[in-house]
Amino acid sequence: MVKIKNIIISLFVLITFSTTVFGIEDLTVQKDAVLTLNDCVNIALHNNPVIKNARYNYGISKANVNIARSEFFPTLGVGTGFNHAANNTNRSDTTTNLYSVEASLNQLLWNFGRTNAHIKMQKFYLIADKFYFDNAVRETVFLVKQRYYEVLAARATIAINKAYVDINERNYLRTKAYFEEGIKSKIDLVNAEVTLSDSRIQLIQSEKNYKNSLVNLNNSMYIKSAPNYSIESTENFNISDNVAPVDLSKLVKPVKDEDGHLPISVEDAKLLSSVEKLEVLTNYKMTDFPYNFEECMELAYQNRADLKAYHSTLDAVKENLVYVKRNYYPTVSASAGYGYRDMNRTNSFNVGINVSSSVNIMNQKARVDAAEYQVNIAENSLNQLNQDIYFEVQNAYINMIELEKQIPLLAVKVRQTYENYELAEGRYYVGLGDYIQLQDAKVNYNNAQCSYIETIYKYNVARANLESVIALPQEITITIEDS
């Protein structure tokens, strides 16, 4: 009895400590925290359910390998029974009680490589699931970077449009003062009011886009009820305030006529006539990408985890074809058995080697055909992915290079439109220019700044996308075994 208890305890300990739990606890954001891009990536990698599912699938494949290996382990059978028989006749009554104990052991000796093929197939699926996990990590990192840059761009656009509202408020006050003095006409004053309203609408739209970008960032990190926090600017996207606040706690309806009022008059609006230059980006740096197109293609084919997963899947279905074909061959096994009956106190023991084969020819041929089609599908999917990767890298590289060319040109355009705005405003308020020229100059200056920010955002996303499609190693990542 003690021996049996010890065996049960040993089996329990073996099962408990041989099972790998692939669980990583979710990460949260502390209130008023200041997060870097790497912090957001780390949170997403721990919270993303796609990554968790990839880890669980890897665990299932690991178990499937052990299941396949178990075919080489012996199968132990134990049984006991009790039979009671009673016979009643006119002459006598007889009662028989029969106790029996039986044990059997079956061991696979050889099945002509069928089990070996099954084990190899499951190992290849295990390798493929590991690469699918790595691919989920790669896609998650890119998504967070995209959402992070989106917030910075939206934040910078708000700053631009706020400055644009200030410009139009000053312009309205100046125009009103000149109108009251009889220098400017009524139509100039009305146009100033309309332009101010348009700029306020544009600011509200940018604020909406900013809040939506915050939702997208939180969604990419899988944080449902995020507290107020901030994100830092990056080296390639250094906005002027350096820290972008994230606050979605107050989603309320606006107060009636909140933005419908005109600016309060001042005694001397002429004092506000200077044009202020807005520096949205400070210390902007655009480092050269270290690889040319040919090197990017080599890195993509060398590093892409999904491509490696497709290769492993193809190897797995090839082994499955071998496994199915070998079902034609017989199975060689050994067996041993022991029995005890207390009626005659008899003991029996048997040992044998068995050769068995059971094949449904029609069923087996259909299974072989299906397995061959699976190989064809896997080969076709692999070829398609090779082509898709080529075009992905090509498009990503072209996008990044073209955007990189545009950034310095747009920076020059911002400076030029600013200078043109200064000239147009000076001409207008000394009576040499008309309102249309002034308004065009203001719109061009504001649009140039917005285009500049939008292009920098697209460039950062394009660069992150190129890093993703060639699977460059990232500073922050996780592995399948992290816990």
Image (cartoon, rainbow, N blue to C red):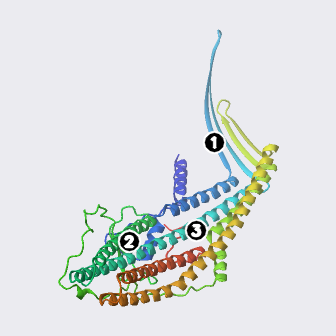
Q: Secondary structure at mark 3?
A: helix
Please state if 172 lies on the left or on the right of 469 as rendered.
left
Q: Is residue 301 above or below residue 256?
A: below
Q: Earlier in the sequence, mark 2 or mark 1?
A: 1
Q: Residue furthest left?
A: 267
Residue located beneath label 2 in the image: 206
Q: Badge 1: few (under 14), some or many (20 or more) residues near its Cα, within 10 Å?
A: few
Residue 78, labelled with which disc? 1
Residue located beneath label 3 in the image: 135
In the picture, residue 434 is in which quadrant? bottom left
Q: How far, Cα to Cα, is label 2 from label 1?
A: 75 Å
Residue found at x 65% / y 47%: 76
The amino acid sitting under disc 1 is Val
Could you tell me residue 184's position as x and y percent?
Answer: 27, 82
Comparing 295 with 330, the one in front is 295
Please state if 429 lies on the left or on the right of 266 as rendered.
right
